[in-house]
């Protein structure tokens, strides 16, 4: 008699992270996958095609028959399905635990860091796929060249993002761990930078014996953490621009193309070209190159794969370009001051002498109030800055905190620079403005982790008709 299958139910299955994990369990014949989400979407449709039963709306009956529940940090204890699962004594797992069950028994490659996780893990997954390694992967964005954020491969290799936002990165035991950087963020979870340091130290402590840690020497906070690492049972490789064991030198920007030499332990190993711009993406690439070499991939194979890599959606994604392939409308997920500075530096290298117009949607009230001063200084290279209302991301509003707090800080930081700095009341107003701004003399960008990309995607689709 065949063993009865586990029925695993995902609450919020339409989220990018949850959907990726669900797809992994859909490929495991020991499980039946069900789920629920507040809204229908392309992701939900795809999951149904893969065999998941997905309910729209959160109702108590959705969990009936489930033997295990998976939830993300965004799902509150007052969710009716969580309350019903507790009443029925159905085990409830955080999504990181559900992912760790599969990841920790594989040859795991984790990518952690406050910024750059999605791009780096996407590049890593694409490189391994293109070099015939058939990896499994779950990343936080749709990999543009692969058309998915998750896949189940035939090999033992498994690539994931290790998320620091809720501390869940401590659930994973990787063979190879990449750490891109550490920056104060997620103030709803961390009291201060020292708390964040402690979580990354625990993550480093979880690397399997004989494994490898690849870390960015250009990051000040990561250097502080590395000074406390005492493990001798693993390999440690640093990377950076003109510093570290593996370095990028002689960087040249040409539109969206970025070329640079790679020097490893003092020896030049090749010249690389990327199709995604920015110093931060050069750093991300160095980490992927080193991980590939640790996996005994040939440098020519790594180079050939990365030259055509476009990263994931919403990471300097060109939505509309002119007949000469000059970007006119670009969307990016950047929502932290450090990410904004890096993204706009890349945008300036692409725009050159053209006007750089940036529309920014702040993400979360807690981040806005904690980093308002830093946001004010993050837009220096932009010529025109439009600030949109805050995307709450489920947070309760904080009295006195709105998008005008950031607007005022930007204005103060740019006194005497004669820039156009203003706010809009909603995304409909923004749409009307952007349509009029797109021209061959400007590069228009939408920034933010909320839903501002809906406007830029709509405009791009209409302009292509």
Image (tube, rainbow, N blue to C red):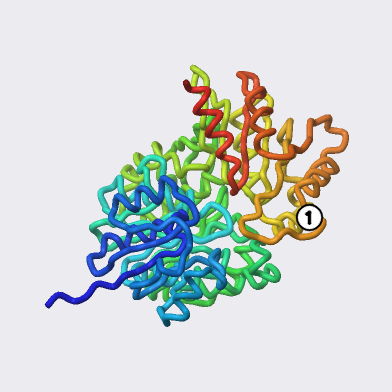
Circle 1 residue? 401
- Percent position (x, y) of residue 461? 49, 28
Q: Residue drawn at (26%, 60%), measured in percent from left and top?
A: 27
Q: Residue furthest left?
A: 1
Q: Nearer the viewer, residue 66 or 64?
A: 64
Q: Residue drawn at (27%, 68%), measured in percent from left and top?
A: 31
Q: Residue furthest right?
A: 416
Q: Quadrant of residue 308?
A: top left
Q: Is residue 374 above or below residue 84?
A: above
Q: Quadrant of residue 453?
A: top right
**Total marks in image:** 1
Q: Nearer the viewer, residue 221 or 445?
A: 445
**In the displayed structure, does residue 285 sit left or right of residue 420?**
left
**In the displayed structure, does residue 35 sit left or right of residue 277?**
left
Q: Secondary structure at mark 1?
A: loop
- Percent position (x, y) of residue 346? 60, 37
Q: Can residue 99 be seen in the rendering of this structure?
A: no
**In the displayed structure, does residue 293 sit left or right of residue 51?**
right
- Percent position (x, y) of residue 338? 66, 50
Q: Can residue 400 be seen in the rendering of this structure?
A: yes
Q: Residue drawn at (46%, 65%), measured in percent from left and top?
A: 59
- Viewport quadrant of the N terminus: bottom left
- Percent position (x, y) of residue 418? 83, 30
Neighbourhood count class around disc 1 (C-alpha, 10 Å): few under 14, some 14–19, many 20 upward:
some
Q: Residue drawn at (51%, 59%), measured in percent from left and top?
A: 238
């Amino acid at each position: 008699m065949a063993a009865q299958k586990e029925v695993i139910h995902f609450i919020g299955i339409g989220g990018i992270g949850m959907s990726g994990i669900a797809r992994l369990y859909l490929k495991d014949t020991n499980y039946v996958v069900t789920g629920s989400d507040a809204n229908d979407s392309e992701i939900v449709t795809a999951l149904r095609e893969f065999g998941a039963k997905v309910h729209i709306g959160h109702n108590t009956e959705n969990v009936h028959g489930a033997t295990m529940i998976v939830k993300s940090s965004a799902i509150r204890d007052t969710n009716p399905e969580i309350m019903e699962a507790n009443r029925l004594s159905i085990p409830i797992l955080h999504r990181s635990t559900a992912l760790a069950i599969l990841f920790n028994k594989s040859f795991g490659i984790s990518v952690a860091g406050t910024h750059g996780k999605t791009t780096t893990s996407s590049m890593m997954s694409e490189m391994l796929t293109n070099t015939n390694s058939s990896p499994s992967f779950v990343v936080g964005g749709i990999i543009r060249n692969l058309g998915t954020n998750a896949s189940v491969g035939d090999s033992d290799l498994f690539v994931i993002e290790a998320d620091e936002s809720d501390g869940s990165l401590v659930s994973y035991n990787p063979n190879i761990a990449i750490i891109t950087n550490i920056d104060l963020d997620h103030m709803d979870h961390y009291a201060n930078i020292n708390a964040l340091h402690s979580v990354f130290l625990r993550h480093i402590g979880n690397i399997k014996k004989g494994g490898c840690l690849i870390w960015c020497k250009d990051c000040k906070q990561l250097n502080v953490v590395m000074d406390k690492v005492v493990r001798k049972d693993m390999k440690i490789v640093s990377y950076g621009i003109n510093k570290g064991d593996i370095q990028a030198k002689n960087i040249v920007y040409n539109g969206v193309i970025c070329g640079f030499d790679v020097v490893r332990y003092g020896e030049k190993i090749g010249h690389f070209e990327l199709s995604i711009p920015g110093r931060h993406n050069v750093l991300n690439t160095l980490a992927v190159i080193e991980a590939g070499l640790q996996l005994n991939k040939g440098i020519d194979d790594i180079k050939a794969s990365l030259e055509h890599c476009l990263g994931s959606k919403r990471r300097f994604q060109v939505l509309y370009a002119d007949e000469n392939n000059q970007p006119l409308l670009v969307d990016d997920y950047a929502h932290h001051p450090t990410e904004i500075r890096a993204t706009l530096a890349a945008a300036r290298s692409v725009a050159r002498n053209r006007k750089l117009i940036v529309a920014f949607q702040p993400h979360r009230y807690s981040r806005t109030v904690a980093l308002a001063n830093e946001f004010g200084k993050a837009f220096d290279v932009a010529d025109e800055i439009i600030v949109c209302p805050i995307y709450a991301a489920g947070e309760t509003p904080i009295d006195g905190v709105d998008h005008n707090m950031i607007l005022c800080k930007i204005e103060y930081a740019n006194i005497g620079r004669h820039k156009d700095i203003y706010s809009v009341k909603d995304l409909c107003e923004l749409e009307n403005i952007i349509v009029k701004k797109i021209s061959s003399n400007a590069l228009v960008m939408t920034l933010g982790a909320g839903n501002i990309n809906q406007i830029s995607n709509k405009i791009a689709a209409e302009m292509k008709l």
